Amino acid sequence: MSNDFSLTDDAINQELQQLVYEVRRYPANSKNPQDRAKRRIALNKLINAIRCSGKLSKQGQWMESPNYEDYYHEALQITFVEICQKIEQYNPEYPVMVWVNIILARRISDVAKKDQKRGITQLPKHQKVAPVLALDELNKDVPIENEIYSEQQQLKEVIENDPENILKDDYIHGYPQANLKAILLLVLEGKRWKDISEELGVSISTASSFYQRRMRKTITYLKKYI
C-alpha cells in the first residue's frame, strides 16, 4: 500500500481489490505447495495494505470503555484471521474496507461481550488485561443443587458477609474506606474504574492495581464459601 495519503478512496479500494484477486488466484484447498505459499504471501500483502490504508475504523462507540485498547487490538487480530479464512466471501460490489470494518465492528462487540460475561473485568485503558476474578472460575465447583441463586447473587452474598473479615480488613494504605470488600462490590455492580476511584477517593491506577494484586488470594478465599 502506498504511503501517499492523497490517494482517493477509489484508488485505495482498487489497490485492495487487486490484492484480493491475487489471493483468490491460489485456492485455499490447493494441493500444490507453491500455490499455498503464494496464497500466504498474497494474504500477507493484503493484510499489510489494510493496516496501512488509513481506513480502518476506530470503532468510536467503544472508546469510552476502560478496556477499549485491549478490545480493539484483540478484535483487529481476530478480524485479520477472519479475512484470511473468508476472503472468497468478499463481494466486489462493495469496497474492501467496508467489508473489513463490518467484520471489525462485529468482532469488537464479541470481544466486549465475552469480557463482560467474565464478571469482574473492568480495567483502566492504560493497563493491560490481567487475570482477574471471574464468576466462572469461582463457581465451577458449585454443586447443581446450590444453583437456586444466580452466580452473581451467590458471589455478592459471600463478599457482603465476608465471614473472616479478610476483605474488609484489607484496604489501600491511608484509605480504610477503599477496602477490598467495597471495591469488589462496586466492580460486581458493573461500576467503571473511573466511578470507583471517585467514590472511594483514590486514583484509578491505585484502586485497580490493589484489586489485581489480591485476586488470586481472593478467589481462594471466596471459593471456601461458595
Image: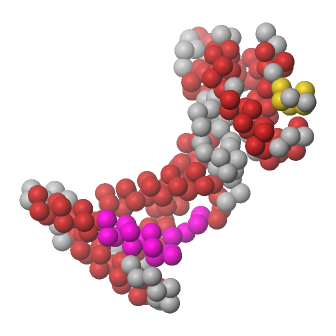
Residue 27 visible in this rendered orientation of the protein: no
The extreme front residue here reads 173
Instruction: Report whether residue 78 is seen.
Output: yes
User: Measured from the top left, where is residue 107 in percent x and y?
Assistant: 50, 55
- Compared across the picture, whether 225 is left or right of 180 comes to left
Q: Name the quadrant containing residue 153.
A: top right
Q: Of residues 161 and 32, which is closer to you in this image? A: 32
Could you tell me which quadrant the N terminus lies in? bottom left
Q: Quadrant of residue 29?
A: bottom left
Query: Residue at position x 36%, y 84% from top?
Result: 14
The color scheme shown is secondary structure
Which range is magenta? 44-59
Q: Position of residue 80 (x, y in %)?
A: 40, 59
- Residue 13 x %, y %: 40, 81
Is 93 situated left or right of 6 in this image? left
Location of residue 82 with respect to 159 vertically, above or below: below
Magenta segment includes 163? no
**Pick the front one: 178 or 29:** 178
Occupied quadrant, residue 43: bottom left
Q: Residue at x 22, y 69 (%)?
A: 24
User: In percent of the image, x 18 and y 71: which residue is there?
Assistant: 25
> As displayed, is residue 225 above or below residue 167?
above
Q: Quadrant of the C terminus?
A: top right
Count the numbered circles shown. Answer: 0
Q: Which is more toward the observer, 30 or 123?
A: 123
Q: Position of residue 109 (x, y in %)?
A: 56, 53
